[in-house]
Amino acid sequence: MTQLLILYAVTVVVFLGLDMLGINFLIRPVFDRHVGHLLASPLRLGPAAVFYMVYVAGLLWFVSVPALKENAPLQALIGGMVLGFLCYGTYEMTNYATLRDWSLEQVAADLVWGTVLTGFSAWVGVAVLSGKLA
């Protein structure tokens, strides 16, 4: 149980820390250009916190815990990227299909970011716990 809590903590810190940078410097400028008039101000932190906590829990369930059992950080990286692509792709493609002002630039930026972020976060968590990241 302690190992699982550490895996969760490491993964959520990496994911959240990097996503704050990514949102501010990569994603927000693109979204401002296309749907800035729709963005909440101030940001609704409650729903954001729920997303981060649940998304990372799902990442552990589907990717990180199985990879840790196999002592395979590379498996976590690849599995995390697949999961990130599926999750962020669902969000982006649904918005692109249904929202008039959604752009291919938003789809591309957020899809690539979510794929890399999810895979990297899973990889770091598993690598730290498996002793392959010192």
Image (cartoon, grey):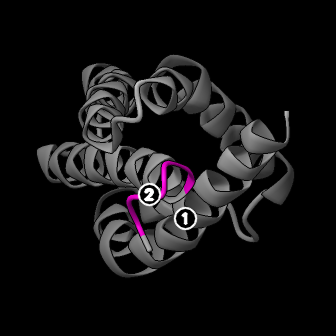
Q: Is residue 46 visible?
A: yes
Residue 26, image x, y percentages: 31, 73
Q: Residue at x 27, y 24 (%)?
A: 93
Q: Residue at x 57, y 72 (%)?
A: 17
Element on which disc 1 rests: helix
Residue 14: give its label: 1
Question: Distance between the Cα atoms at labels 1 and 2?
Answer: 8 Å
- Magenta residues, dominant SS class: loop
Discs 1/2, front? 2
| Amino acid at dot 1 | Val
Span of residues in magenta: 129-133
Q: Between residues 114 and 118, which one lies in front from this camera angle?
A: 118
Residue 85: percent from the left, percent from the top? 27, 31
Tag 1–tag 2 contact (CB < 8 Å): yes
- Quadrant of the rendered image containing residue 42: bottom right
Q: Amino acid at mark 2?
A: Val
